[in-house]
Amino acid sequence: MAKVEDILRRMRTVPHDVPFAVVAKVCEHYFGTPRQRGTSHAVYRTPWPGDPRVNIQQGKNGKAKGYKVKQVVQAIERLLVQERQEDNDAE
């Protein structure tokens, strides 16, 4: 299977054409084990207050829903920015 960074790049460019299992793999890499996993949904915790979750949903074709993939990408970008800020503050 492709590297997480390669998958994330694909998620940014073609969000409507990413298999649900692949999006779940990326979410587990960044957010850990899902706190809830149903048949067509998986919910992951995020480290910030407010709406502390990422919820992915599987469409009928086995792919993740495009708008959910976009939300995952936004959450990952927010996480990466937050980590960079923490690294800069630690220096």
Image (tube, grey):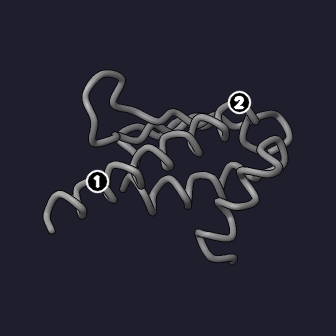
Give the image location of residue 33, x and y in percent.
37, 54
Q: Which quarter of the figure is the N terminus placed in?
A: bottom right
Real-space CA distance between mark 1 and mark 2, rounded to the nearest whole angstrom? 27 Å
Going by the image, does 17 lie left or right of 50? right
- Of residue 40 and residue 79, the one placed in the foreground of this image is 79
Q: Amino acid at mark 1?
A: Gln
From this viewpoint, which residue is outermost toward the left?
90
Q: Which residue is at 36% across, 56% downward?
A: 32
Q: Amino acid at mark 2?
A: Tyr
Q: Which quarter of the figure is the C terminus placed in?
A: bottom left
Label whose residue precedes the other's in the sequence (1 or 2): 2
Q: Nearer the viewer, mark 1 or mark 2?
A: 1
Give the image location of residue 39, x and y in percent.
60, 37
State the residue position of label 2: 67
Tell me if mark 1 has few (under 14), some (14-19) or many (20+) residues whose alpha carbon lies within 10 angstroms of its own: few
Q: Which residue is at 40% across, 37% downward?
A: 36
State the residue position of label 1: 85
Q: Which residue is at 75% across, 53% downward?
A: 19
Going by the image, does 20 lie left or right of 84? right
Going by the image, does 22 lie left or right of 53? right
- Of residue 17 and residue 48, the one placed in the foreground of this image is 48
**Residue 74, image quadrant:** top right
